[in-house]
Image (spheres, grey):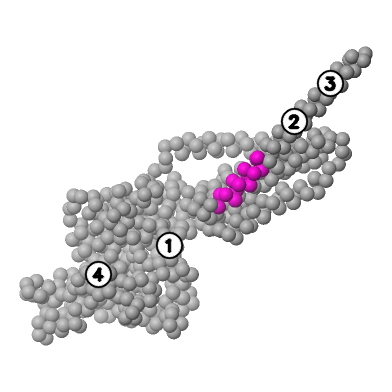
Amino acid sequence: MCKCDEGFFLCLSINNCTTGRPYCKDKDECKMTKTKCGSNATCVNTIGSYCCPFSGITQSGTKKACSRCEIECYFSKNSINSHVSKQMCLNSCQMKALYTNMGRDVERASDETSKVAKILDNAERILRSLVEVPWNASEERKSMAEFDIVIRRHMSPVEPIVVSAHGNSMEIDPVILMDTATGKRSRNSAIAFIVHKNMTTFLGNESAVREETLATPERKSDVLNSAIITAAITSKTRDFPTHPINFTFSHITANVNNSIIRCVYWTGTLNGTPWSPDGCELVFSNKTHTVCQAFHLSSFAILMALKDLPHVFALEVITYIGLSVSLVFLLLAIITFATCQLVNDTRRTIHIHLCVCLLVADFIFLFGISLTGNRIFCGIIAGVLHYTFLAVFAWMFLEGIQLYLMVQVVFVPKVPLKRYMLWVGYGFPALIVTISAAVSYEGYGTESSCWLSTKNFLPCSFFVPALLISIINFIFLCKTLMTLKKKLSDVISENKTLGKQR
């Protein structure tokens, strides 16, 4: 059974508090007990607690004195008419106090994760309380050194809703704010998010968060390369499988080396990695910004590979040089076969198509395999590569058949292979790619390259046909060599017989 901290109660679907996952909701201590600060005294509700905004009141007994920041919020003459409500101001004070308290020296590295967890958990609670407070202003903003808070209300029911702060933004579909029971949006619907600007500095490293704190098991060199965004909306549901939320992150360090970017969310797990990519997808990325899609609400960020493996650069140089040389000679081969009339027409056609497919595949691989910034474009590149490489093997298969037929039926002037060549050479790969895309289109393109993802066995749709064609061609080659050996033996035997007769 889930248990909430002091000052919160468990919000469940059975008490009509939420239709999604249970969460801990703030108690209003001032409403529960009107004499918290004494008779006829003012009580100020805060997230998880309360305070008494009168000078001279100490924390003795049950009374809790408000901080200077909270007192300024409560007694500010301009707060009622400004674009920042008292509740927003008070909650910002709490976040600032939380950063101050958590920023004290902690020797153990494991405590860094617990500090981050406490800040992000409280940030979610603060946002949930803020979106439930009605306010006339369409937008509220509060900026401090450690974070920015933004709340949007009274939004268009048709256009996408965007909030932004500190170079980061969140975009949601207005359908998300609809009440599942009535199908209409509440007048008090709101969205809010907090941008934690200096989390890396807070964790004690000015350039990057420590690897053991934020690295995933698969990539120990991943570092935080964006501000952390915590989001909340008035919807009781926290999962949105059909209407994902888009987050745009500004990079802390420019991704000039085209390093791998991962969209992740904070799980709060203190044992193991606290970050998970589940429910998060990379949509677009360039040197300065990354767009991620999330199918649920939480705290989000991006992780970037700190450095590539030592041998990657050498492999890239070999690949670029090898493919460039290959492109030149493939082009020369196409020109040669196209202009040479001495070669058998069927063989010449097969050679031309084989070289063209290899040329296209090498060109796309050379210039497109690493274009992982745009998820859709990367998927298209992966699909084209899948098709062209399969077409290469299909024409190699036709080459093997042609070689076998040349030896077996050498005296037949025409073989009915040419009429089926285009269907086999291009139709067979198209059929495989179409079926593969229909079954698992999301497997085209990965975070590291525009090729087939290994998560759902999609590479089998390439390697299995390629392996079968290689085996069949090897069988054709063996049979061809055996036939040539037999015919050569017959020729030698005939020559010996003629020699004896002479």
Kind of residue at badge 1: Gly
| Residue 482 circle label | 2
Q: Secondary structure at mark 2?
A: helix
The span from disc 4 to disc 2 (Cα, nearest Å) is 78 Å
- Residue in view at x 9 percent, y 71 percent: 59
The span from disc 3 to disc 1 (Cα, nearest Å) is 74 Å
Q: Is residue 347 magenta?
A: no
Category of crowding for the residue at label 2, using alpha-carbon neighbours closer than 10 angstroms: few (below 14), some (14–19), many (at least 20)? few
In this rendering, the label closer to the viewer, 3 or 4: 3
Q: Are marks 2 and 1 in contact (CB under 8 Å)?
A: no
| Residue 372 visible to the viewer | no
Q: Are marks 3 and 1 in contact (CB under 8 Å)?
A: no
The span from disc 1 to disc 4 (Cα, nearest Å) is 25 Å
Q: Can you identify the residue that label 1 sits on?
A: 279
- Residue in view at x 30 percent, y 79 percent: 133
- Residue furthest bottom as drawn: 40
Question: Taking 329 as reference, is 263 above or below it?
Answer: below
In this picture, which residue range is highlighted in magenta?
A: 458-471
Relative placement, left or right, of 322 versus 202 is: right
In this rendering, the label closer to the viewer, 4 or 2: 2
The span from disc 2 to disc 1 (Cα, nearest Å) is 57 Å
Q: Secondary structure at mark 1?
A: loop
| Residue 3 circle label | 4
Answer with mark 3 or mark 2, whichever residue precedes in sequence: 2
